[in-house]
Amino acid sequence: MNIVQVSAELAPWSKTGGLGDVCGALPRALVQRGHRVVTVSPRYKAYDGAWDTGVRARVHLFGYTHEVAYYHLERDGVHHLFVDHPSYRRPGIYGDDNGVYGDNLFRFALLCRAALEAPLRVPIDGAVLGEDVLFHANDWHTGLLPVFLEANYRSVGRYPTSPAVLAIHNAGHHGAFDAHEFAGLDVSTRWWNACDMGGRLNCLKAGVVLAAKLVTVSPTYARQLCIDHGHGLEGLFSHRARDLWGILNGIGEEWNPATDKHLETNFTADDLSGKHAAKAALQREVGLPVRPDVPLFGLVSRLDHQKGIELVMGAAPWLLRQDVQFVMLGSGGAAYEDFVRRLAREFPSRARGIVGFSEPLAHRIEAGADAFLMPSRFEPCGLNQLYSMRYGTVPIVHATGGLADTVPTWEPGNGTGTGWAFRDFSVDAFIQALAFALQTFREHPEAWRRIQDNGMRRDFGWHRAAELYEALYVAAYGR
């Protein structure tokens, strides 16, 4: 199968969160299953090893003809195409310190058009892919790709059997713009109804209407999209429920405690001595007392409404009176960042808060913490709870979306749990889960070790998800 994955982010070259990680990892797993995979994403800056193919494409948008160039880089069997245009060469992916970029609709519509031109123009392994391809679009940034596929290509006999699949990583972001912007897309007004939501141009809705199949990043989130997490699109998701798949994300080998380059000492499920060393190293790094006996809680997160930071703020005073340590790393809303900064001032021997993001420190928190907090208000899939389990760090999560699918609550009667998942989104429910974890850590060390072992031995590799995506693509061709 020839698969063209289109995304605004592609790790390790561009990333703001899980979207970049997924779009970087899934293609490698699909190649291992024998498929040819080409990724198409913007060239936000010069990338080492990416060379100019010399291929150019011209597309008409917003009253002008725009020329794009394609840069190529092959890694792990995946062919990466980076679309070069002046509108992408900016400090941020979506915006900067002054806010979101005002021409994002143009920038990502251009990405969609460039992606549709790529199989027809850019040689891969000596020849163009041609018209027998499957397009895998991701989130609102590529929600217009199915529109352009129908309006500009299928209508004139191009790509007659090539389906488009749309992956929804977070339905909270629609890509909504003023209705008058539709005219700049250079498509017939007959496609307005697919894009119209409340009198505005809605890129995500357009993709949900016109994609052959839809997929989101966990089975529970797929169900929630149809009920109460669709952010106004619940009726449409419900209408397309038979075409909506839920496939859990995997995690790559860069998150493996046995080989993690960010750790001084590596470890495995069979030997946790390296984890004990990682805990001491983390305590030293952030300036907390080195105490192997104290339970150390970690949190790495965007600091925003979705991530349930209000629950952390509400539970922290109780938690930090229990002789524990707590390390937070994240950035986001000003009030949340102020809370993070206050932690060390109010609890100097027990808490540290670091505003910002550091990939190496994120790895060391996952490795050195005993438990990881993830009380998200909603979470399509979540990756940090998967990282935590792989590192023997017990997750305490709100039972929503992918968190509900991946973290079974520990119950002594069956012994299969990997953490605690509380159902009510409330400070009281969160504290109760924290209390269960503290009691188990202090009074039942054998049970704690069993919980760690359960999590570390679960298989969250991408090969499992790739099999399901392959089945999804086959179904999309059938439709």
Image (cartoon, rainbow, N blue to C red):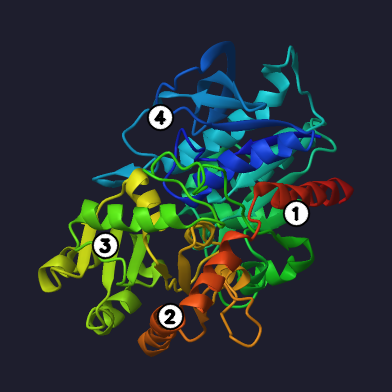
Pick the front one: 174 or 423: 423
**Mark 1, other Cα within 10 Å: few <14 / some 14–19 / many ≥20:** many
Question: Which comes before the other along the chain, label 1 or label 2?
Answer: 1
Task: Determine whether label 4 and label 2 are within 8 Å by CB.
Answer: no
Provide the residue designation for mark 1.
213
**Mark 3 or mark 2: which is in front?**
2
Residue visible at 71% across and 25% down in the picture = 119
x, y percent for residue 420: 50, 78
Which of the 4 image quadrants contains residue 98? Answer: top left
Question: Which comes before the other along the chain, label 3 or label 2?
Answer: 3
Disc 2, SS: helix
Q: CA distance from mark 3 to mark 2?
A: 29 Å
Q: Which mark is residue 437?
A: 2
Residue visible at 67% across and 18% down in the picture = 122
x, y percent for residue 292: 31, 66
Q: CA distance from mark 1 to mark 3?
A: 35 Å
Disc 1, SS: strand
Question: Which comes before the other along the chain, label 1 or label 4?
Answer: 4
Residue 292, placed above or below residue 11: below
x, y percent for residue 47: 44, 22
